[in-house]
Image (cartoon, rainbow, N blue to C red):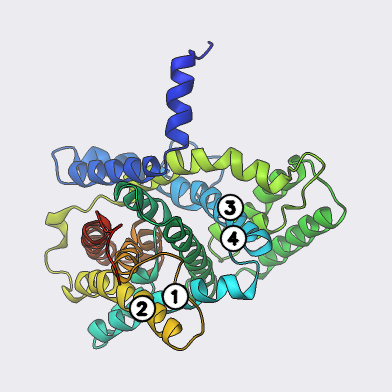
Amino acid sequence: MAVSPAKKGIWHKLKHNEAAPGIVLMICAAAALILANSPLHDPWHALFHHDLPWTPVAKLNNLHMWINDALMAVFFFVVGLEIKREILDGELSSPSRRRLPVIAAVAGMAIPALIYLGIVGSDPSLHRGWAIPSATDIAFAIGVLALAGKGLPSSLRLFLLTVAIVDDLGAVMVIAFFYTSGLDLNWLAIAAAVFIALVAVNRMGVSALAPYIIGAIVLWYAVLHSGVHATIAGVLAALTVPLALNEKHDSPLLRLEHALVAPNGFLIVPLFGLANAGVALGSIDGGPLALPIAIALGLVLGKQVGILGSIIVAEKLGIAARPAGATLRQLWGLSLLCGIGFTMSLFIAGLAFPESPLLVEEAKLGILGGSILAALAGLFLLKGSAKSTA
Protein backbone atom coordinates (compact mmCIF):
# COMPACT_ATOMS: atom_id res chain seq x y z
CA MET A 1 0.00 0.00 0.00
CA ALA A 2 1.40 3.37 -1.04
CA VAL A 3 2.15 5.95 1.64
CA SER A 4 0.46 9.30 1.10
CA PRO A 5 2.67 12.39 0.62
CA ALA A 6 1.26 13.84 3.85
CA LYS A 7 2.30 10.77 5.84
CA LYS A 8 5.71 10.77 4.17
CA GLY A 9 6.08 14.39 5.16
CA ILE A 10 5.21 13.69 8.80
CA TRP A 11 7.68 10.79 9.00
CA HIS A 12 10.38 12.87 7.30
CA LYS A 13 9.88 15.70 9.79
CA LEU A 14 9.85 13.27 12.71
CA LYS A 15 13.12 11.63 11.62
CA HIS A 16 14.82 15.01 11.32
CA ASN A 17 13.49 16.41 14.61
CA GLU A 18 16.29 16.15 17.17
CA ALA A 19 13.88 16.22 20.10
CA ALA A 20 11.63 13.44 18.74
CA PRO A 21 13.61 10.30 19.79
CA GLY A 22 14.11 11.73 23.29
CA ILE A 23 10.42 12.56 23.61
CA VAL A 24 9.41 9.06 22.42
CA LEU A 25 11.81 7.59 24.99
CA MET A 26 10.33 9.79 27.75
CA ILE A 27 6.80 8.64 26.83
CA CYS A 28 7.85 4.98 26.88
CA ALA A 29 9.62 5.37 30.22
CA ALA A 30 6.53 7.04 31.72
CA ALA A 31 4.29 4.29 30.29
CA ALA A 32 6.52 1.57 31.76
CA LEU A 33 6.49 3.26 35.17
CA ILE A 34 2.70 3.61 35.13
CA LEU A 35 2.09 0.02 33.99
CA ALA A 36 4.53 -1.36 36.57
CA ASN A 37 2.46 0.28 39.34
CA SER A 38 -0.98 -0.52 37.96
CA PRO A 39 -3.28 -3.55 38.13
CA LEU A 40 -1.68 -4.59 34.83
CA HIS A 41 1.68 -5.16 36.55
CA ASP A 42 1.58 -8.96 36.45
CA PRO A 43 0.65 -9.36 32.75
CA TRP A 44 3.07 -6.54 31.87
CA HIS A 45 5.91 -8.34 33.69
CA ALA A 46 4.90 -11.65 32.14
CA LEU A 47 4.99 -10.15 28.64
CA PHE A 48 8.72 -9.54 28.93
CA HIS A 49 9.90 -12.22 31.36
CA HIS A 50 7.85 -15.39 30.76
CA ASP A 51 9.40 -18.05 28.54
CA LEU A 52 8.55 -17.82 24.86
CA PRO A 53 6.75 -20.82 23.28
CA TRP A 54 9.58 -20.94 20.69
CA THR A 55 12.85 -19.12 20.19
CA PRO A 56 15.45 -19.48 17.40
CA VAL A 57 18.23 -18.90 19.95
CA ALA A 58 17.91 -21.12 23.02
CA LYS A 59 19.93 -18.73 25.18
CA LEU A 60 17.31 -16.01 24.61
CA ASN A 61 14.15 -17.55 25.96
CA ASN A 62 12.06 -14.45 26.73
CA LEU A 63 11.26 -11.08 25.18
CA HIS A 64 13.34 -9.17 27.75
CA MET A 65 16.46 -11.10 26.73
CA TRP A 66 15.78 -10.53 23.03
CA ILE A 67 15.53 -6.79 23.64
CA ASN A 68 18.56 -6.50 25.96
CA ASP A 69 20.88 -8.98 24.25
CA ALA A 70 19.82 -8.81 20.58
CA LEU A 71 18.13 -5.50 19.79
CA MET A 72 20.56 -3.63 22.02
CA ALA A 73 23.40 -5.16 20.01
CA VAL A 74 21.97 -3.18 17.07
CA PHE A 75 21.95 -0.08 19.30
CA PHE A 76 25.63 -0.65 20.10
CA PHE A 77 26.31 -1.28 16.41
CA VAL A 78 25.03 2.23 15.67
CA VAL A 79 27.11 3.57 18.56
CA GLY A 80 30.15 1.86 17.04
CA LEU A 81 29.46 3.40 13.62
CA GLU A 82 29.19 6.86 15.21
CA ILE A 83 32.40 6.38 17.20
CA LYS A 84 34.35 5.25 14.12
CA ARG A 85 33.04 8.13 11.99
CA GLU A 86 33.88 10.70 14.67
CA ILE A 87 37.39 9.31 15.21
CA LEU A 88 38.26 9.10 11.50
CA ASP A 89 36.43 12.11 10.10
CA GLY A 90 34.75 14.08 12.88
CA GLU A 91 35.21 15.94 16.12
CA LEU A 92 37.56 13.26 17.48
CA SER A 93 39.78 13.16 14.39
CA SER A 94 42.49 15.53 15.61
CA PRO A 95 44.16 16.02 19.03
CA SER A 96 43.12 19.66 19.30
CA ARG A 97 39.46 18.88 18.61
CA ARG A 98 39.16 15.86 20.83
CA ARG A 99 41.18 17.13 23.80
CA LEU A 100 38.38 18.87 25.73
CA PRO A 101 35.58 16.34 24.98
CA VAL A 102 37.81 13.47 26.07
CA ILE A 103 38.90 15.26 29.26
CA ALA A 104 35.29 16.21 30.06
CA ALA A 105 33.94 12.73 29.33
CA VAL A 106 36.59 10.96 31.43
CA ALA A 107 36.05 13.34 34.37
CA GLY A 108 32.30 13.00 33.86
CA MET A 109 32.60 9.24 34.28
CA ALA A 110 35.15 9.18 37.09
CA ILE A 111 33.55 11.67 39.52
CA PRO A 112 30.08 10.01 39.52
CA ALA A 113 31.76 6.63 40.13
CA LEU A 114 33.74 8.06 43.06
CA ILE A 115 30.62 9.67 44.56
CA TYR A 116 28.77 6.37 44.22
CA LEU A 117 31.55 4.39 45.90
CA GLY A 118 31.87 7.03 48.61
CA ILE A 119 28.21 6.56 49.55
CA VAL A 120 27.96 2.74 49.30
CA GLY A 121 31.54 2.03 50.37
CA SER A 122 30.56 0.18 53.53
CA ASP A 123 28.43 -2.34 51.61
CA PRO A 124 30.58 -4.58 49.34
CA SER A 125 27.46 -6.09 47.72
CA LEU A 126 26.79 -2.73 46.04
CA HIS A 127 30.30 -2.06 44.71
CA ARG A 128 29.55 -3.64 41.31
CA GLY A 129 27.18 -0.78 40.57
CA TRP A 130 29.95 1.84 40.43
CA ALA A 131 29.56 2.41 36.67
CA ILE A 132 25.78 2.97 36.72
CA PRO A 133 25.89 6.77 37.25
CA SER A 134 28.81 7.20 34.83
CA ALA A 135 26.70 6.92 31.67
CA THR A 136 25.00 9.54 29.49
CA ASP A 137 21.92 8.95 27.32
CA ILE A 138 22.54 10.71 23.99
CA ALA A 139 18.94 10.63 22.72
CA PHE A 140 17.48 11.88 26.00
CA ALA A 141 20.12 14.61 26.45
CA ILE A 142 19.87 15.88 22.85
CA GLY A 143 16.07 15.83 23.13
CA VAL A 144 16.12 18.02 26.24
CA LEU A 145 18.70 20.33 24.64
CA ALA A 146 16.38 20.75 21.64
CA LEU A 147 13.51 21.57 24.02
CA ALA A 148 15.62 24.36 25.51
CA GLY A 149 14.83 26.40 22.41
CA LYS A 150 16.71 28.38 19.80
CA GLY A 151 19.46 30.88 20.48
CA LEU A 152 21.98 28.48 22.00
CA PRO A 153 25.36 28.35 20.22
CA SER A 154 25.68 25.44 17.78
CA SER A 155 28.99 24.55 19.42
CA LEU A 156 27.06 23.50 22.54
CA ARG A 157 25.14 20.74 20.73
CA LEU A 158 28.30 19.55 18.99
CA PHE A 159 30.19 19.44 22.28
CA LEU A 160 27.37 17.49 23.96
CA LEU A 161 27.31 14.97 21.11
CA THR A 162 31.09 14.53 21.22
CA VAL A 163 31.22 14.11 25.00
CA ALA A 164 28.34 11.61 24.83
CA ILE A 165 30.10 9.59 22.11
CA VAL A 166 33.33 9.42 24.15
CA ASP A 167 31.14 8.50 27.15
CA ASP A 168 29.59 5.68 25.11
CA LEU A 169 33.05 4.43 24.17
CA GLY A 170 33.97 4.45 27.85
CA ALA A 171 30.78 2.56 28.74
CA VAL A 172 31.55 -0.08 26.10
CA MET A 173 35.02 -0.57 27.59
CA VAL A 174 33.58 -0.77 31.10
CA ILE A 175 31.07 -3.44 30.02
CA ALA A 176 33.76 -5.43 28.21
CA PHE A 177 36.33 -5.35 31.03
CA PHE A 178 34.27 -5.19 34.24
CA TYR A 179 30.99 -6.97 33.48
CA THR A 180 32.32 -10.08 31.76
CA SER A 181 32.49 -13.42 33.57
CA GLY A 182 32.57 -17.15 32.89
CA LEU A 183 34.40 -16.97 29.56
CA ASP A 184 33.97 -19.83 27.08
CA LEU A 185 37.30 -19.91 25.23
CA ASN A 186 35.93 -21.95 22.32
CA TRP A 187 33.21 -19.43 21.51
CA LEU A 188 35.65 -16.61 22.16
CA ALA A 189 38.02 -18.11 19.57
CA ILE A 190 35.17 -18.36 17.05
CA ALA A 191 34.25 -14.73 17.71
CA ALA A 192 37.87 -13.68 17.20
CA ALA A 193 38.04 -15.61 13.90
CA VAL A 194 34.84 -13.94 12.65
CA PHE A 195 36.13 -10.50 13.64
CA ILE A 196 39.43 -11.14 11.81
CA ALA A 197 37.45 -12.25 8.76
CA LEU A 198 35.43 -9.01 8.83
CA VAL A 199 38.65 -6.99 9.06
CA ALA A 200 39.99 -8.93 6.06
CA VAL A 201 36.81 -8.17 4.08
CA ASN A 202 37.34 -4.49 4.89
CA ARG A 203 41.00 -4.66 3.79
CA MET A 204 39.96 -6.24 0.49
CA GLY A 205 37.91 -3.12 -0.24
CA VAL A 206 34.52 -4.85 -0.22
CA SER A 207 31.80 -2.18 -0.24
CA ALA A 208 28.71 -4.42 -0.41
CA LEU A 209 26.75 -4.39 2.86
CA ALA A 210 25.79 -8.09 2.91
CA PRO A 211 29.17 -9.48 4.10
CA TYR A 212 29.30 -7.01 6.99
CA ILE A 213 25.68 -7.63 8.03
CA ILE A 214 26.02 -11.43 7.86
CA GLY A 215 29.38 -11.28 9.63
CA ALA A 216 27.93 -9.04 12.35
CA ILE A 217 25.12 -11.55 13.02
CA VAL A 218 27.55 -14.47 13.22
CA LEU A 219 29.87 -12.45 15.47
CA TRP A 220 26.94 -11.54 17.74
CA TYR A 221 25.93 -15.22 18.04
CA ALA A 222 29.48 -16.25 18.96
CA VAL A 223 29.93 -13.43 21.49
CA LEU A 224 26.51 -14.21 23.00
CA HIS A 225 27.81 -17.67 23.95
CA SER A 226 31.33 -16.56 24.91
CA GLY A 227 30.64 -14.95 28.29
CA VAL A 228 31.35 -11.43 26.98
CA HIS A 229 28.14 -9.44 26.78
CA ALA A 230 26.60 -9.83 23.33
CA THR A 231 26.24 -6.09 22.74
CA ILE A 232 30.04 -5.76 22.50
CA ALA A 233 29.73 -7.65 19.19
CA GLY A 234 27.76 -4.70 17.81
CA VAL A 235 30.63 -2.28 18.44
CA LEU A 236 33.29 -4.68 17.13
CA ALA A 237 31.34 -5.37 13.94
CA ALA A 238 30.76 -1.64 13.39
CA LEU A 239 34.49 -0.94 13.57
CA THR A 240 35.08 -3.19 10.54
CA VAL A 241 32.61 -1.34 8.26
CA PRO A 242 34.49 0.89 5.75
CA LEU A 243 34.14 4.67 5.95
CA ALA A 244 36.17 5.46 2.79
CA LEU A 245 34.03 7.49 0.40
CA ASN A 246 33.43 6.45 -3.22
CA GLU A 247 32.95 8.74 -6.21
CA LYS A 248 29.38 9.40 -5.05
CA HIS A 249 30.67 10.55 -1.63
CA ASP A 250 29.05 7.52 -0.04
CA SER A 251 30.37 4.59 1.98
CA PRO A 252 29.05 1.38 3.62
CA LEU A 253 29.35 2.99 7.06
CA LEU A 254 27.33 6.05 6.09
CA ARG A 255 24.67 3.91 4.37
CA LEU A 256 24.27 1.67 7.41
CA GLU A 257 24.25 4.57 9.85
CA HIS A 258 21.63 6.40 7.78
CA ALA A 259 19.48 3.26 7.55
CA LEU A 260 19.67 2.41 11.26
CA VAL A 261 19.45 5.79 13.02
CA ALA A 262 15.65 6.02 12.79
CA PRO A 263 14.90 2.38 13.82
CA ASN A 264 17.40 2.81 16.64
CA GLY A 265 15.83 6.01 17.96
CA PHE A 266 12.16 5.21 17.34
CA LEU A 267 12.00 1.45 17.90
CA ILE A 268 14.96 -0.16 19.68
CA VAL A 269 15.64 2.40 22.43
CA PRO A 270 11.91 2.98 23.18
CA LEU A 271 11.38 -0.80 23.41
CA PHE A 272 14.31 -1.00 25.80
CA GLY A 273 12.70 1.76 27.87
CA LEU A 274 9.38 -0.09 27.96
CA ALA A 275 11.07 -3.33 29.01
CA ASN A 276 13.45 -1.88 31.60
CA ALA A 277 12.24 1.46 33.01
CA GLY A 278 9.24 0.17 34.95
CA VAL A 279 9.89 0.31 38.70
CA ALA A 280 7.32 -1.43 40.88
CA LEU A 281 7.55 0.96 43.82
CA GLY A 282 5.93 -1.50 46.20
CA SER A 283 8.61 -4.11 45.49
CA ILE A 284 11.58 -2.11 46.76
CA ASP A 285 10.65 -2.02 50.45
CA GLY A 286 13.58 -3.24 52.50
CA GLY A 287 16.17 -2.52 49.83
CA PRO A 288 19.33 -0.53 50.63
CA LEU A 289 18.45 3.17 50.44
CA ALA A 290 22.11 4.01 49.80
CA LEU A 291 21.93 2.50 46.29
CA PRO A 292 19.36 4.85 44.68
CA ILE A 293 20.80 7.84 46.57
CA ALA A 294 24.33 7.05 45.37
CA ILE A 295 23.18 6.67 41.76
CA ALA A 296 21.04 9.82 41.78
CA LEU A 297 23.79 11.94 43.35
CA GLY A 298 26.34 10.48 40.98
CA LEU A 299 24.23 11.52 38.00
CA VAL A 300 23.09 14.93 39.22
CA LEU A 301 26.13 16.08 41.21
CA GLY A 302 28.95 13.97 39.81
CA LYS A 303 28.35 14.75 36.15
CA GLN A 304 28.17 18.49 36.61
CA VAL A 305 31.21 18.59 38.90
CA GLY A 306 33.23 16.34 36.61
CA ILE A 307 32.32 17.92 33.27
CA LEU A 308 31.96 21.58 34.23
CA GLY A 309 34.94 21.39 36.57
CA SER A 310 37.17 19.84 33.90
CA ILE A 311 36.14 22.49 31.35
CA ILE A 312 37.00 25.31 33.77
CA VAL A 313 40.32 23.73 34.78
CA ALA A 314 41.29 22.96 31.16
CA GLU A 315 40.52 26.55 30.16
CA LYS A 316 42.39 28.06 33.12
CA LEU A 317 45.47 25.93 32.43
CA GLY A 318 45.39 26.69 28.71
CA ILE A 319 44.91 23.01 27.81
CA ALA A 320 41.77 23.62 25.74
CA ALA A 321 39.28 26.40 25.08
CA ARG A 322 35.60 26.13 25.93
CA PRO A 323 33.10 25.62 23.04
CA ALA A 324 32.90 28.81 20.96
CA GLY A 325 30.27 31.27 22.15
CA ALA A 326 29.16 29.18 25.13
CA THR A 327 28.65 30.89 28.47
CA LEU A 328 29.44 29.37 31.85
CA ARG A 329 25.72 29.01 32.58
CA GLN A 330 25.18 27.14 29.32
CA LEU A 331 28.09 24.83 30.02
CA TRP A 332 26.66 24.18 33.48
CA GLY A 333 23.31 23.32 31.94
CA LEU A 334 24.98 21.02 29.42
CA SER A 335 26.92 19.30 32.22
CA LEU A 336 23.63 18.59 33.96
CA LEU A 337 22.13 17.14 30.77
CA CYS A 338 25.03 14.68 30.72
CA GLY A 339 23.60 13.44 34.04
CA ILE A 340 20.67 11.92 32.15
CA GLY A 341 21.93 8.36 32.33
CA PHE A 342 18.77 6.42 31.54
CA THR A 343 19.33 3.91 28.69
CA MET A 344 22.98 3.07 29.32
CA SER A 345 22.61 3.33 33.11
CA LEU A 346 19.62 0.95 33.07
CA PHE A 347 21.60 -1.41 30.88
CA ILE A 348 24.62 -1.40 33.21
CA ALA A 349 22.37 -1.86 36.25
CA GLY A 350 21.12 -5.14 34.81
CA LEU A 351 24.72 -6.28 34.29
CA ALA A 352 25.86 -5.14 37.74
CA PHE A 353 23.21 -7.04 39.72
CA PRO A 354 22.09 -9.96 37.52
CA GLU A 355 21.18 -12.16 40.49
CA SER A 356 19.31 -9.53 42.51
CA PRO A 357 16.03 -8.18 41.08
CA LEU A 358 15.60 -6.05 44.22
CA LEU A 359 18.89 -4.24 43.66
CA VAL A 360 18.05 -3.72 39.98
CA GLU A 361 14.72 -2.14 40.99
CA GLU A 362 16.49 0.06 43.55
CA ALA A 363 18.99 1.08 40.89
CA LYS A 364 16.17 1.94 38.48
CA LEU A 365 14.68 4.25 41.08
CA GLY A 366 17.99 6.11 41.42
CA ILE A 367 18.47 6.26 37.65
CA LEU A 368 14.99 7.60 36.96
CA GLY A 369 15.09 10.08 39.83
CA GLY A 370 18.59 11.31 39.02
CA SER A 371 17.93 11.53 35.27
CA ILE A 372 14.71 13.50 35.76
CA LEU A 373 16.37 15.93 38.20
CA ALA A 374 19.35 16.39 35.85
CA ALA A 375 17.03 16.97 32.87
CA LEU A 376 14.87 19.55 34.67
CA ALA A 377 17.82 21.41 36.19
CA GLY A 378 19.70 21.43 32.89
CA LEU A 379 16.61 22.63 31.00
CA PHE A 380 16.07 25.40 33.56
CA LEU A 381 19.63 26.68 33.14
CA LEU A 382 19.60 26.46 29.35
CA LYS A 383 16.13 27.87 28.78
CA GLY A 384 16.48 31.50 27.84
CA SER A 385 20.23 31.50 28.51
CA ALA A 386 21.21 32.77 25.06
CA LYS A 387 21.84 36.27 26.44
CA SER A 388 23.63 35.13 29.59
CA THR A 389 27.27 36.11 30.04
CA ALA A 390 29.97 34.21 31.83
In the rendered view, tell whether residue 80 sits above or below residue 262.
below
* Residue 130 percent across, percent down from the top left: 36, 77
Secondary structure at badge 4 equals helix
Q: Mark 1 points at which residue?
A: 104
Q: Circle 3 sits on which residue?
A: 77
Does residue 281 appear anywhere in the picture? Answer: yes
The reply, left or right, for residue 138 in relation to residue 259 is left
Q: Alpha-carbon distance for marks 4 and 1? A: 16 Å
Image quadrant holding the C terminus, namely: bottom left
Q: Can you give x and y, in whole percent of width and height, for residue 68 in the image?
A: 45, 52
Q: Which of 342 and 194 is in front in this view?
A: 342
Q: Marks 4 and 3, Cα distance to the nearest angstrom? A: 10 Å
| Residue at the extreme top of the image, as rendered | 1
| Marked residue nearer the N-terminal end (2 or 4) | 4
Percent from the top left, x then y, of residue 177? 53, 75
Mark 2 element type:
helix
Rendered image: mark on residue 83:
4
The residue identified by callout 2 is 306
Nearest to viewer (mark 4 / mark 1): 1
- Amino acid carrying mark 2 in the image: Gly
Residue at 29% x, 64% y: name it. Answer: 333
